[in-house]
Image: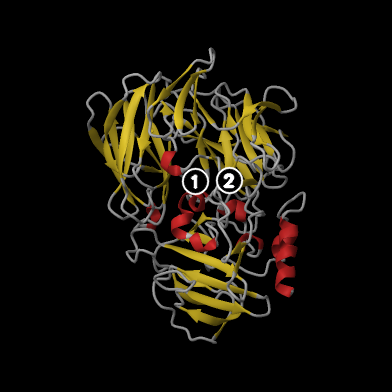
């Protein structure tokens, strides 16, 4: 009873109206983080949360089938050998028990007074402990390893909190004292966010409302219709045309709430930047698409049902999947035609003249051998459909109307080869090789890219980089690290954390400010009022196509909020 009461108390505190995860609630959490160093590009980063994650939705049947296809722990990305510490006082209960623990080595600690077991998976070596041995909170008990045993493929720590009988896995976010909003925004892995079931559009969307996992029950995430779509069929990222947004004015940005509390994760912008779109609806019914104006204060309006649509940058076209077939619709006339993409979602080119899509013959499972991926192009009306070429997994991005950026893994490692792919010559020109590449984003117009490169051999070279997309260009280390988005072709918007703007503070309550960085001048500016910090849930924030606004999912009321830039 005591263990269950603690879990329910933590859950009720996390889901209280506002703020949802107050400092007083966090201080009541009985566990600490499994590292004795702060997070950052040279130490460790959060890479996947608990529950209904993107990784679980796409790969749960391979990795988490025994746990209802949900991710039943937390993943922390860290180099092999990074010390792991006990998250609370306890005694060693199991070592290398592979009936539940993960390879190559694992450890379980019993926290009898708290009514939980903590499990540490993917350890580098068998822990030098004995069953029944007491350990203290913060004591080094193991080291991070790699499930593929190479220390090059996907080194990370998998941490679980279970019931003493090992049958139930609880959400560690509700039990570990940490600044989860901050951790979710610094170097977050693409597996880390959550997937929306469009028949239950507000269920299991925050880090705090994830279901417990019962290892004897059926899968929970076999969704009939999801957003985003499955990774195997997903589109390449969108690249906007080259443009410069209006210069910032005086003063700070203004903020206002757009939706009711509890609604809605994963918003997206109308092509003309006049409205924020999102999905909402009653549980069990197909969600509707809503639009809320950013130009005037009006109630949100329904604009049609799911499924999801992709819009061209010029607003003239949309793409929708109907019964597994790709339909291109001219928005002004409603006329449409089907394009043979094998179920894959195409992406529009920056000037809305062409389409690009991938075709994967199998799921591209990290840690495995990537499938040989087909890369296709066509005119925006579907004409002149052509197989551009093949590559071994990875991704392809639009740079401009004549060039693509090809990103390909090198073997089973975290090093990626970047190349410029010319549509005129069909040739690839090498650009760079990047170890531990994450979070790549292309600037509008395609002249510059941004990416994370943590955990470099030289720690001083770990961080966030900008790079020109020209042969011979060299990556440039930027003077900040944290969540970022392009505003226009030369300006980056990024988050700063707490009054001291330190992304590695663990006592700032997850408070954030929005800042800008001009890549041409190096000029930085705080855009939001330091007296009115905010907290973003799940790193869920999006810049309008015209660079004038930001919409974010607020971690204090779980409503959508608008930031209108000065």
| Identity of the residue drawn at 47% across and 47% down | 190
Q: Is residue 393 left or right of residue 113?
A: left
Left of 69 or right of it: where is 199?
right
Q: Which mark is residue 541?
A: none
Mark 1 Cα-neighbour bin, 10 Å: few <14, some 14–19, many ≥20: some
Q: Which residue is mark 2?
A: 496
Q: Please say whether residue 478 is visible from this viewpoint.
A: no
Residue for point 62% across, 57% down: 179
Query: Residue 186: image x %, image y %?
Result: 52, 50
Q: Quadrant of residue 11?
A: bottom right
Image quarter of residue 266: top right
Q: Is residue 323 above or below residue 48?
A: above
Question: Could you tell me which secondary element the residue under label 1 belongs to?
Answer: loop
Report the residue that reaches farthest toward the top.
Answer: 333
Frontmost residue, 438 versus 261: 261
Residue 382: x, y in percent?
A: 38, 21
Point 63% across, 69% down: residue: 31
Q: Is residue 271 above or below residue 358?
A: above
* Between 556 and 114, the one nearer to me in the picture: 114
Can you say whether 191 is above or below 161 in the image?
above
Please report contact status of discs 2 and 1: CB closer than 8 Å, yes or no. yes
Q: In terms of depth relative to the viewer, which is nearer, 505 or 396?
A: 396
Q: Secondary structure at mark 2?
A: strand
Distance from disc 2 to disc 1, alpha carbons, whole Å, reads 9 Å
The scheme the figure's colours follow is secondary structure
- The quadrant holding residue 232 is top left
**Quarter that holds the N terminus:** bottom right
Comparing 404 with 377, the one in front is 377
Q: Which residue is mark 1?
A: 480
Residue at left offset 26%, top offset 38%: 390
Q: Quadrant of the C terminus?
A: top right
């Amino acid at each position: 009873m005591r263990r269950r009461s603690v879990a329910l108390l933590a859950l009720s505190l996390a889901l209280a109206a506002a703020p949802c995860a107050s400092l007083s609630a966090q201080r009541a959490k009985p566990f600490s983080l499994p590292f004795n160093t702060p997070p950052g590009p040279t130490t460790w980063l959060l890479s996947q949360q608990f529950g209904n994650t993107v990784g679980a939705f796409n790969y749960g049947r391979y990795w988490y089938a025994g746990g209802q296809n949900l991710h039943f722990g937390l993943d922390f990305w860290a180099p092999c050998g990074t010390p792991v510490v006990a998250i609370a006082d306890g005694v060693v209960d199991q070592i290398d028990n592979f009936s539940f623990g993960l390879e190559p080595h694992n450890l379980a600690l019993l926290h009898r007074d708290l009514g939980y077991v903590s499990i540490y998976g993917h350890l580098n070596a068998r822990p030098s402990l004995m069953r029944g041995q007491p350990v203290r909170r913060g004591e080094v008990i193991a080291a991070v390893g790699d499930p593929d045993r190479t220390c090059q493929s996907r080194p990370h720590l998998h941490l679980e909190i279970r019931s003493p009988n090992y049958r139930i896995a609880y959400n560690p976010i509700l039990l570990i004292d940490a600044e989860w909003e901050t951790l979710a925004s610094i170097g977050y892995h693409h597996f880390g966010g959550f997937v929306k079931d469009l028949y239950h559009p507000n269920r299991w969307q925050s880090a705090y409302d994830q279901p417990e996992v019962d290892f004897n029950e059926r899968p929970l995430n076999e969704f009939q219709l999801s957003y985003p779509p499955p990774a195997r069929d997903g589109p390449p990222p969108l690249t906007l045309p080259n443009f410069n947004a209006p210069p910032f004015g005086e003063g700070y940005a203004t903020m206002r709430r757009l939706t009711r509390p509890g609604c809605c994760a994963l918003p997206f912008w109308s092509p003309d930047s006049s409205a924020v779109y999102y999905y909402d609806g009653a549980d069990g019914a197909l969600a509707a698409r809503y639009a809320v104006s950013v130009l005037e204060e009006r109630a949100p309006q329904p604009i049609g049902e799911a499924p999801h649509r992709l819009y061209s940058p010029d607003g003239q076209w949309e793409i929708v999947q109907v019964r597994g077939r790709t339909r291109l619709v001219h928005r002004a006339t409603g006329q449409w035609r089907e394009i043979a993409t094998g179920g894959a979602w195409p992406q529009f080119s920056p000037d809305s003249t062409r389409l690009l899509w991938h075709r994967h013959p199998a799921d591209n499972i990290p840690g495995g051998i990537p499938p040989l991926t087909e890369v296709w192009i066509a005119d925006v009306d579907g004409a002149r459909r052509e197989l551009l070429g093949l590559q071994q997994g990875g991704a392809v991005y639009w740079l401009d109307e004549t060039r693509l950026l090809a990103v390909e893994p090198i073997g089973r490692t975290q090093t990626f080869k970047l190349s410029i792919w010319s549509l005129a010559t069909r040739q690839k020109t090498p650009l760079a090789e990047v170890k531990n590449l994450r979070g790549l984003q292309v600037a509008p117009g395609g002249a510059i890219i941004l990416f994370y490169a943590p955990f470099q051999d030289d720690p001083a070279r770990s961080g966030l980089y900008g790079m020109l997309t020209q042969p011979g260009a060299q990556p440039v280390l930027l003077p900040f690290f944290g969540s970022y988005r392009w505003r226009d072709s030369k300006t980056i918007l990024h988050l700063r954390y707490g009054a001291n703007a330190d992304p590695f503070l663990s006592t700032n309550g997850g408070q954030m400010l929005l800042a800008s960085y001009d890549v041409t001048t190096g000029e930085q500016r705080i855009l939001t009022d330091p007296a009115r910090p905010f907290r973003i849930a799940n790193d869920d924030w999006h810049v309008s196509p015209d660079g004038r606004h930001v919409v974010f999912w607020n971690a204090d009321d779980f409503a959508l909020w608008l930031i209108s830039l000065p």
